[in-house]
Amino acid sequence: MSTPQQRLEELGLSLPELLAPLASYSPVMRSGDLLYISGQLSSDENGIIKGRLGDNIDVETAQMAAKNCALSILSQIANSANIGLQDIQQVIKLSIFVASTPDFYSHHLVANGASDLMVEILGDKGKHARAAFGVAALPLGAVVEIEAIVQIDPSQIDASWEK
């Protein structure tokens, strides 16, 4: 069985560089063996992926934006928590926020972009509970924002990493 890093490479993907927080918050907080990853905005090599579903963005573009958010979540774990992706025991929950018009009803399809990628990379450890919300606007005009709760192998927690 291949490792999460090998699966990333097989998919032709890599973890993005971390963006500095845009406000007063911590990108990752730990409580015991749980990591709480702050909302990651949809972005790519050109910056924030902006727009609203039902207005100027289609579902396929938003699914790709959600995949990029999932990659940013994994990057936050690997960099902020200083652990390897193989140390993830379970993705517990994803909360997916989708900028959309009031008459757009396919938020779940957008969310599948992130959910499917987590399973592709992490296997059964990537299966999770989730909620998908339609919102009027997201920070910086982003089309998708995703936050996560992830359980990690407690033996891999760096003793110097504060709760």
Image (spheres, rainbow, N blue to C red):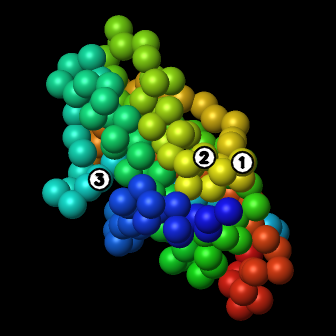
Q: What residue type is labelled 3?
A: Ser
**What secondary structure is found at the residue carrying circle 1?**
helix
**Residue beneath the point at 70% across and 37% down:** 129
For this rendering, which residue is in front, 6 or 27? 6
Cα gap from disc 2 to disc 3, whole angstroms: 21 Å
Q: Residue at x 21, y 19 (%)?
A: 55
**Quadrant of the rendered image containing residue 51:** top left
Q: Earlier in the sequence, mark 1 or mark 3?
A: 3
- First reached walking from the N terminus: tag 2 or tag 1: 2
- Disc 2, disc 1: CB below 8 Å? yes
Assess disc 1: are there few (<14), some (14-19) or many (≥20) residues with their C-alpha within 10 Å of its C-alpha: few
Residue picked out by circle 1? 124
* Above or below: residue 44 compared with residue 33: above
Residue at 38%, 60% (x, y): give it.
Answer: 13
Residue type of the residue flagged with mark 1:
Asp
In this view, 107 is above or below 151: above
State the residue in front, 119 or 100. Answer: 119
Location of residue 11 in the rendering, given as x and y in whole percent from the top left corner: 42, 56
Q: Quadrant of the C terminus?
A: bottom right
Q: Give the secondary structure at mark 3.
A: strand
State the mark number for residue 119.
2
Is 39 displayed left or right of 23 in the figure?
right
User: Where the N terminus falls, by quadrant?
Assistant: bottom right
Give how far apart the Cα atoms at labels 1 and 3 are.
26 Å
Residue 92 placement (x, y as % from top left):
72, 48
Q: Earlier in the sequence, mark 2 or mark 3?
A: 3
Depth check: 134 or 74 in front? Answer: 74
